[in-house]
Amino acid sequence: MNASSIATLVHPTLRSRAPGLLLAIVIALVAWQLGRFAPLIGGPVFGIVLGILVRNLFAPGAQFAHGIAFAGKQVLQWSIITLGFGLSLSQVAKTGLESLSVTLVTMTVAFLAARLLGRWLGVHDKLKILIGVGTAICGGSAIAAVTPIIRPDDHDTAFAISTIFLFNLVAVLLFPLLGHLMHMSDMGFGLWAGTAINDTSSVVAAGYSYSHAAGDYATIVKLTRATLIIPVCLVLALVVAAREKRRHKQEGSVGHFSLASIFPWFILWFLVASAVRTAGLVPVAIQPAIHLLAEFLIIVALTAIGLSADLRRMIASGARPILLGLGVWIAVSVSSLMVQLVIGKL
């Protein structure tokens, strides 16, 4: 194949993706700057909100669709892999082991609450999973990680992230006050914030508003908790694979399905990136740049998800997903305190 033939194949793809990808990047740049002015909200939330507004006020034409879809899926996976270079597994090992019992209990409670309460409220399975994972692990990042596996509608992803953000904001304002009223130790509050608040930025905000020591401890607990997205994604991939296999068997086309087609390969590369960071192969001088790149990529991806979200369908979903998010968040917060009380960490 000569150069002109390759150009013929590649250029139409690039041309079809360029408008939507550029639109997502431009909006993401605005969201990034807004996130710097209002770090409590953060660039990712601004990105998805601006994306939803542009989608529903200006309705970008069909020429933007391919690029928006590319940003919402492929760039999303790149952002997760890039995050791996900023997460040293050895750095969080000691604190991770100390907080593991509380983290495992709160994760289990989150998934059970999402399943049972979601069924009672009549929320469909994929939205239950998104809200459960976002509450159990690490908010928008966890939702972003499982999205390529369970493949929900974009408006469901946007709804889940918006719901998680709402309770992050409440937690940042409420947790320090409650912590002081309960006379919690710095370590106890850090463990509570790190296991019961969803997004990393909100954990940091709540932790350091309580005390510097609480902020340090909460941050490490939160980073450890974030690594659990790996086994969760693998389990979800196996569940999706089993369902796909049953479906193909019923249709008489078992041979057309393989686990490799559903396996979240980006999570494997995330592990590789984390191992590279742990081995000290990432120069200290470029680590801030990698962190900024990961942050920007996830803002681009979430902006694209917002650009794909149908606000009318989100409104039609009603209050039930918000009630689900509230119920799961309360269950996680209370279970974290109860476990700490039992093991004497408060």
Image (cartoon, rainbow, N blue to C red):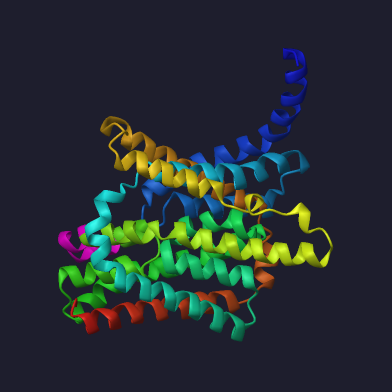
Q: Is residue 342 above or below residue 105?
A: below
* Residue 203 left/right relative to 138: left
Q: Is residue 57 above or below residue 252?
A: above
Residue 32 visible to an observer of this rendering: no
Q: Nearer the viewer, residue 269 or 45?
A: 269
Q: Is residue 61 left or right of residue 130?
A: right
- Identify the residue at horizontal 68%, vertical 55% (top origin): 56
Front position in the image: 5 or 304: 5
Whether residue 210 is in magenta: the answer is: yes
Which one is nearer the viewer's eye here, 22 or 213?
213
Residue 197: % across, % down: 36, 67
Q: Quadrant of the N terminus?
A: top right
Q: Is residue 74 left or right of residue 268?
A: right
Magenta segment, which residues?
205-216
Dominant secondary-structure state across the stretch colored magenta: helix
Name which quarter of the figure residue 66 lies in: top right
Look at 66% across and 73% down and name the residue there. Answer: 317
